[in-house]
Image (cartoon, grey):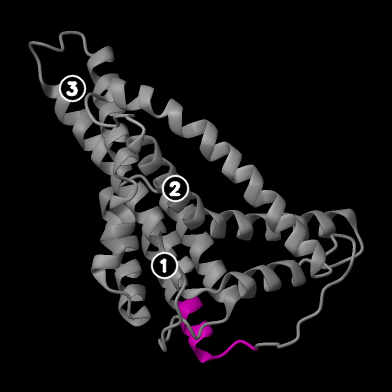
Amino acid sequence: MFSQYRYINSAVNKLHPITKLTVTITLLVTAMLIGTFSQLILIACFYFFAVKFANVRISEVLRDVLSFKLILTATMLIHIFVGFSIASQPLRELSWLYGSLETGAFFSIKIVLMISIIGLLLRTAHPAEMARYMSVISQGGTKMNRFASSLGITTELSIRFLPGLLSEAKRIKFAQQSRGVIYKGSIIKRITALNSLILPLLTAVLDKTDIITDAMQSRGYRLNRARTLYKKENLKWGDAASIFLLGILIFAIVN
């Protein structure tokens, strides 16, 4: 399952949930905005530094990335197709191919980094803990605060819903294969075969949405009510060190 949470006695697990969320969002936004390989390398170094202190095995990171291999392959093929389309003489000159491969590799590395960063957050942050703090920090009586609170809890549930969604898609895929659906062959055949996967997956998503809604309402969750914390956590020196290192990274990328 993609980046399932498990508690490990590590420095990253002990960080405050808000610190982990702040660092993750900052890294994701930075990864989307940068435009050179050197900047990607800086973010990758910061990420592997965090992986080291989180006691996460590299094999787990690779498994997360390989679960999105279809998206990575499609990214490369799209850039090659675009480069072939805009080239004046695509069959005689191959300069367009080198440029397309370079651009495709750049965006593929971006996707890999973003997947890995989100995966590290999911492995080290408990979903209930994150949802609790995201809703509490946006409390208030104004409509904007209520909107921010609902947006925070929706975002966290959406991120945590991804592992279950991938697991459900895998289960449906095996069930469809047992009925004779073939997911191998050319790209066109694979895309056509996915039609048999989309409708059952959509139905499963809607069912799980109803279950989550009923579970939240049974626990007294209301958007128009202020929430409190049974256990409050304070920022520690590790949180300050993480924010400081993140600031150094942003400064190095900008300059």
The residue identified by callout 3 is 96
Q: Amino acid at mark 2?
A: Met
Which numbered disc covers residue 32?
Answer: 2
- Binning the other alpha carbons within 10 Å of mark 2 as few (below 14), some (14 to 19) or many (20 upward) gives some
Name the residue rendered at 40%, 41% in the picture: 175
Nearest-to-viewer mark from 3 and 1: 1
Q: Earlier in the sequence, mark 2 or mark 3?
A: 2
Residue 248: image quadrant is bottom left
| Residue 75 at least partly seen | yes
Q: Amino acid at mark 3?
A: Trp
The residue identified by callout 1 is 120
Decide whether residue 143 is among the magenta residues.
Answer: no
Left of 98 or right of it: where is 241? right
Is residue 192 shown above or below 224? above
- Name the quadrant of the C terminus: bottom left
Label 3 and label 1: CA atoms lie apart by: 36 Å
Q: Earlier in the sequence, mark 3 or mark 1?
A: 3
- Binning the other alpha carbons within 10 Å of mark 3 as few (below 14), some (14 to 19) or many (20 upward) gives many
User: Helix, strand, or loop for circle 2?
Assistant: helix
Which percent across, then down, holds residue 46? 34, 69
- Name the quadrant of the N terminus: bottom left
Nearest-to-viewer mark from 1 and 2: 1
Is residue 175 shown above or below 163? above
Is residue 193 shown above or below 242? above
Left of 139 or right of it: where is 21? left
Q: Amino acid at mark 1?
A: Leu
Label 2 and label 3: CA atoms lie apart by: 24 Å
Which percent across, then down, holds residue 196? 44, 28
- The boundaries of the magenta stretch are 234-244
Label 1 and label 2: CA atoms lie apart by: 17 Å
Decide whether residue 243 is among the magenta residues.
Answer: yes
User: Helix, strand, or loop for circle 3?
Assistant: helix
